[in-house]
Amino acid sequence: MLSKIDLSKVVINHLKTFRTNQGKIDIQAILFFYILPFCLSFPLAFFFHIRINECIITAVISAFSIFGALLFALPMSFITLKQQVKGLSTTTIGERNTKKSFCKLLDITFHNLNYCIAIALFTILITILLYLQQEDIVIAIALGIYIHIIFTAIQVLRRIHILMIYSLRL
């Protein structure tokens, strides 16, 4: 029953995108995307006693609901695009390399998008918990997740930009 809602493969596939060209885990990326957000959020919650009022909670829930809903269409578009790109004929080594790089970046961005959808849903749940309990630890976790998803969204935006540049070459 729980296998129907298990998102562990979404998270694992997203984490696999944090590899260098040599196949090693990119420690700096892990630190930036996972550790830094919480290094920023805990002092904000525990030392500066940041509070998140009802108005902000409502705005966050609305924003992430819309964000998640808009993202739902993109993974299917990426699947369709990849099938179209695979069908393109290539005549030179440069064209084959561009096509291969484009498909690899499509796969990586696909996994990042799926992760963004999952984290948007999780963010909504954490924000609802925040509405129910304004404890420092809950605020710190919520702020850390907000920062994390902003960083991840920027990463996805950058990769989509690169995909657009590649698509102009195909």
Image (spheres, helix red, strand yellow):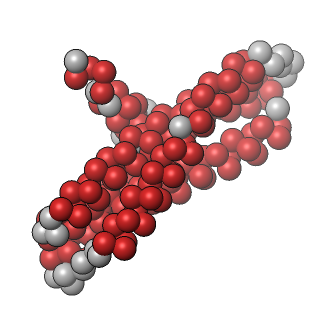
Is 56 situated left or right of 41 in this image? right
Of residues 70 and 78, the one nearer the viewer is 70
- Hey, which quadrant is residue 136 in on the image? bottom left
Q: Position of residue 168 (x, y in %)?
A: 83, 40
Look at 70% across and 27% down and name the residue there.
Answer: 81
- Hey, which quadrant is residue 43 in on the image? bottom left
Q: How many marks?
A: 0
Is 50 situated left or right of 24 in this image? left
* Direction bottom: furthest residue: 48
Of residues 170 and 122, the one nearer the viewer is 122
Quadrant containing the N terminus in the rendered view: top left
Look at 24% across and 78% down and name the residue there.
Answer: 51
- Hey, which quadrant is residue 82 in on the image? top right
Look at 83% across and 37% down and name the residue there.
Answer: 169
Of residues 53 and 164, the one nearer the viewer is 53
Answer whether residue 12 is visible to the viewer in this image: no
Where 163 falls versus 62 (above or below)? above
Where 84 falls versus 34 (above or below)? above
Q: Position of residue 18 (x, y in %)?
A: 42, 41
Where 12 falls versus 130 (above or below)? above
Q: Position of residue 35 (x, y in %)?
A: 28, 58
Answer whether residue 5 is visible to the viewer in this image: yes
Q: Position of residue 85 (x, y in %)?
A: 74, 23
Where 48 falls versus 127 (above or below)? below
Look at 60% across and 37% down and name the residue there.
Answer: 74
Quadrant containing the C terminus in the rendered view: top right
Is 131 situated left or right of 106 in this image? left
Of residues 100 and 164, the one nearer the viewer is 164
